[in-house]
Amino acid sequence: MKRLRAILLTVVISTALSPVAAAARESGDAAERRAEQTLSKMTLGEKVRLLHGPMPMMLPPSKRPEGVAMGAGFIEGVPRLGVPMLVETDASLGVSNLMEIRKGDVATALPSGLSLASTWDPEIARAGGKMIGSEARAKGFNVMLVGGVNLVRDPRAGRNFEYLGEDPLLGGELVGAQIAGVQSNNIIGTIKHYALNALETGRNIHSVIMDEGAMRESDLLAFQIGIEKGNPGSVMCAYNRVGGVFACENSFLLNDVLRRDWGYKGYVMSDWGAVHSTEALLKGLDQQSGEQVDAKRYFSTELTKALEEKRIPVSAVDTAARRILRSIYAHGVADNPLQPGQPIDYDANAAVAQKAAEAGIVLLRNEGGILPLAAGVRSILVVGGNADAGVPGGGGSSQVVPVGGLKRVVPGASTGTAAAFAKRGYGGTAPLDALRAEFPNARISFLDGKDAAAAAAAAKAADMAIVFTEKYATEAIDHPDLSLGEGQDALIDAVASANAKTVVVLQTGNPVLMPWQAKVPAILSAWFGGQRGGDAIARILSGKVNPSGHLPVTFPASADQLPNPVLPGSNIPPANKETRAVYGLQAGLQPYDISFPEGSDAGYRWFDKKGLKPLYPFGHGLSYTSFRYDGLKVTGGKTLTVRFTVTNTGDREGADVPQVYVTRPGKAKRLIGWGKPDLKPGESREVTVTADPRVLADFDAKAQRWVVPAGPVKVEVATSAADPVLTGTARLSRVTRKP
């Protein structure tokens, strides 16, 4: 291993992408030729070495390669041929410090995925990806497990906070930009979790039943767009079954769709603990990740036996190794050796996180223009949400210990073996401190909110009250309901009853119900705000930043409006309380099927199809200024182009997110595009949206074609999925295309 370390240290590089580094990334054809040349020089043992890797924290120190960064896993390289070790880290919201295996380590925490999706801004996604990729490389990682784009199908799912909303076009565009940003650092990025990994409950044993057309028009389309936009070096397959077959050995998903139809050239890695057979190699899986978590070392010990017994041909090993080598060369990993310990500009990176947080905060309600807060406000009561300590973050493999550390950890958030896996902590800038900095002349007091009566009494004596709420979310555990829980609804009701000028700040990883909504004039959804979440919230409240976030998910009025009012699998009791939360296991239970009645009509499409009125619709978001839409021009034919003008009619500069929806006869409406003009008062700008034919089409599984039928369509330019402003019609010509 000393020789390997010497190879890794031969080249000192900057963590930022340089022109030389950019040139080192090769075209697909060149990378394939180089991969073939390297493969021809490798022994069978060296090829197998690329196909599996352990979690370093589960190895004794003597078995760990010298100098390897402690993260999610590593894949041994082939030093004699210049094939580098692949060192992996969880990454979606920053460089994860899973279970604090790198003691004392910190990283810049980005806001949650739903916050990022609320920006509706691919450039913010790209900047965040570039930032965390630079930190990863500086810390000694060259593979980032980034790019979560599973669609939000149920607002109770525990991992929704990592993902990018309920629409395949929005999610695909943003995840592609994020992956491209990460990989600009000569790092391999993933897209995950492929596919239909929509729930944590029983995720290792349930099977999603859905017809091909519905999959292609929703979840698979999000992945397809993300792969086209981001060109990820790897696809991570999911835990769950699809149609009765595990996703990591599902030939339909991995061979037919991903490789045959989409032409994907990278490699498929498993999620940690998602491999169930050596034969998965023949079904499209190339690499077993975190092999100690699986029942067997299927792609090492078991693969060697299968090769000896000729149950697995050597050609299958060659195919998988070739794909891995191709990504190593295509993304500049081989020619830019890791140099761990490079300096990191945490202040500059925090500014990236703050900009993302500010753009992702959604102003849901602002009756009477109570926000922004008046500069001369004299007394403010801040209540709850651990606002004196920091902002919350989600738990699980994406968890980041932010710069400055976790300033408070709430005990008892999870139990048993899950306690280390999912830590409920608070860090980054504290909203209370940030508000005091924004309003230095105001008297700002704080109560933790545990005593609702005391909070109400204090609120009565203040000019206004700001109640910070939270709902912890973590990988491996779904929510039992949509309430805030922990007495917070009663707390809000008590404070709002005592002071009519009450603002609620939601810090959640999911939509929630709001039984107190009518009593509260102003509501912000701040999600999980990341490194400078407190600063971002304070700047929105003060008006230094004009809110521009728009919801990437629907907030239902009740669970009865959902396609599955009862969470699938929630009625099956765990057989082992200690393992129920870890990796979503339900020990000793037989596999069971789950269905999503909405099919391709997830989220706002379901609400439109059923004529349901949500609490807050997909796309909703208010501003401190106002906008006018006019001049609609719609052109049909083989594609659909929509043009219109947006004018800022208020007295503040602000960014708007006008959305374009199309409805075909008998179908639910679909988002086909959006704009995000940032306008000064009185300024106008034309927005043009041209539809990707796939968001207009149906997928004909029998013919294996996308089909846009000829006929009329209704076009809406809207402020949300439920609030059209301009309407028009067009006629489309019949169009078909390959998958």
Image (cartoon, rainbow, N blue to C red):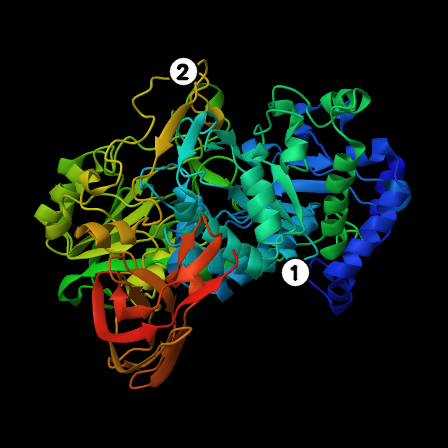
Q: Which residue is mark 1?
A: 184
Q: Residues within 10 Å of mark 2 (few under 14, many from 20)?
A: some
Task: Identify the secondary structure beneath mark 2.
Answer: loop
Count of marks, rendered view: 2
Vertical relation: 278 (above or below) 157: above
- Residue drawn at (56%, 29%) of the image: 274
Instruction: Say which quarter of the image contains residue 679.
Output: bottom left
Vertical relation: 574 (above or below) 697: above
In primary-sequence order, the first of circles 1 and 2 is 1
Return the residue nearer the eye: 545 or 45. 45
- Which numbered circle lies on residue 636? none
| Amino acid type, label 2 | Lys
Residue 622 in sight here: no
Return the residue nearer the eye: 98 or 634. 634
Residue 256 in sight here: yes
Q: Quadrant of the N terminus?
A: top right
- Which numbered circle lies on residue 577? 2
| Amino acid type, label 1 | Ser
Instruction: Say which quarter of the image contains residue 157.
Output: top left
- Residue drawn at (37%, 45%) of the image: 152
Residue 290 place in picture, x, y as percent: 64, 30
Q: Is residue 38 left or right of residue 737?
A: right
Q: Is residue 663 left or right of residue 5?
A: left
Task: Identify the secondary structure beneath mark 1.
Answer: loop
